Amino acid sequence: MTYLNKPDMPCLVVVGGFFGDEGKGKIIAYLAKKDDLSIAVRGGVGPNAGHTFFFKGIKYKVRMLPSAALNPSTRLLIGAGVLINPEILLNEIAVFNAADRTFVDSQCGIIERVHIEEDKADHHLKIDIGTTGTGTGPANADRALRTLKLATDFPELLSYIDNVSNSVNYGLDNNNNVIIEGTQGTFLSLYHGGYPYVTSKDVTASGICSDIGIGPKKVDEVLVVFKAYVTRVGGGPLQNEISSEEANRRGWEEFGSVTGRQRRASPFNMDLAKKAITLNSATQLAITKLDVVFPESAGIRDFGKLQEQPRMFIENIEAETGLRVTLIGTGIDLNDVIDRRGK
Ligand code: IMP
Ligand code: MG
């Protein structure tokens, strides 16, 4: 068993194991405070992701900054592979009072109005795929065509520009604890998900590291986050999908944090979980929203206090996957976590 916060184990990659919305934001927000992270760096697609966390009754959402934004001593970086919507980024920098600790890579691509308009008007994207309409797909298409503008083309971003790959590699070489935040989820990967019902990039752990510019040997731990049930927004198959009435009855109804669309839901899928573990070379797991499936577990922060049903649910996942569930979400506050690292 390794300790995430052990100084010689400094680099943790966090990715989603299903279709996004697994609760990565909450887990990262918790770790940022608990481990007093030095550096949090965001990979993934861009502002099509909304990572949400609650602290002391206040709801926070980030679509551009890493979810570690609440810790004033964590440096917040955005990797070169991530698309930036400048308006959204600048607003979040203001909300989190993060102007002096936010850095974006000079090679980040920029989403412009035309990309958003195309994402919302194109029948294939809007209707068939059901994208978030945030312009990320068209912007990545322009990047592949090598016509997309970069962060350095935008004066309002100049004070934030950095070489993020250098900063992260330097930080790791100097034993800083670094968290690398993925977005979306494994089965929305352009390559490994259920094409064409996917996002516009690879979002597995390797893809996220590539977004940032760190090589595979720099990674110490890969934490794959699963929710205690599965949700999916937009098109594409969802095995064992339950009706929206049934989701409401179970208390599993969720609405997208970027688009407001109701998420489709199904029970926890062990086959998908195992495949995600392989695709990401997971070393440990997090399970979020245990309290939504097992209301009796709400607010519990000690594994020994978990009732039999939720404890068996976790132990079954461990037995099936051979990995330890180190972090368990039991409520909306970022401190509603059972932290089993090192225990
Ligand atoms: P796009 O990433 O906006 O192009 O959307 C492609 C597909 O990925 C659609 O089904 C979206 O609903 C889904 N998607 C993209 N980002 C997220 C996310 O952060 N959470 C959940 N689904 C997402
Ligand atoms: Mg989300």
Image (tube, rainbow, N blue to C red):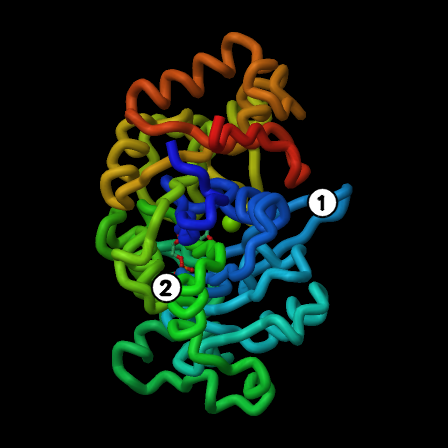
> From what the image shows, is residue 49 above or below residue 105?
above
Give coordinates of residue 177: x percent, y percent: 48, 55
Residue under label 2, please give it. 123
The vertical placement of 196 against 228, above or below, is: below
Q: How many numbered dots are placed on residues in this image?
A: 2
Q: Amino acid at mark 2?
A: His
User: x%, y% of residue 15?
Assistant: 40, 48
Q: Is mark 2 within 8 Å of ligand 1?
A: no
Vertical comparison of 269 with 61: above or below: above
Secondary structure at badge 2 equals helix
Callout 1: SS? strand
Q: Which residue is mark 1?
A: 55
Viewer-nearest residue: 336 or 12: 12
Mark whose residue sits in front, 2 or 1: 1
Seen from the viewer's position, the closer of residues 288 and 75 is 75
Q: Is residue 317 visible?
A: yes
Quadrant assignment, res 320:
top left
Q: Residues within 10 Å of mark 2 (few under 14, many from 20)?
A: few
Label 1 CB, ligand 2: below 8 Å?
Answer: no
In the image, 90 versus 119, the foreground residue is: 90
Is tag 2's residue or tag 1's residue first in the polypeptide sequence?
Answer: 1
Residue occupying image coordinates x 64% and y 22%:
300
Q: Is residue 260 visible?
A: no
| Residue 241 lies in quadrant | top left
Kind of residue sitting beneath label 1: Phe
Q: Residue at x 32, y 33 (%)?
A: 273
- Residue 32 in the image, given as x and y percentages of width and height: 58, 50
Disc number placed over residue 294 in the picture, else none: none
Q: Distance of mark 2 from mark 1, alpha carbons? A: 39 Å
Q: Position of residue 60 (x, y in %)?
A: 67, 53
Which quarter of the rendered image does ligand 1 occupy? bottom left
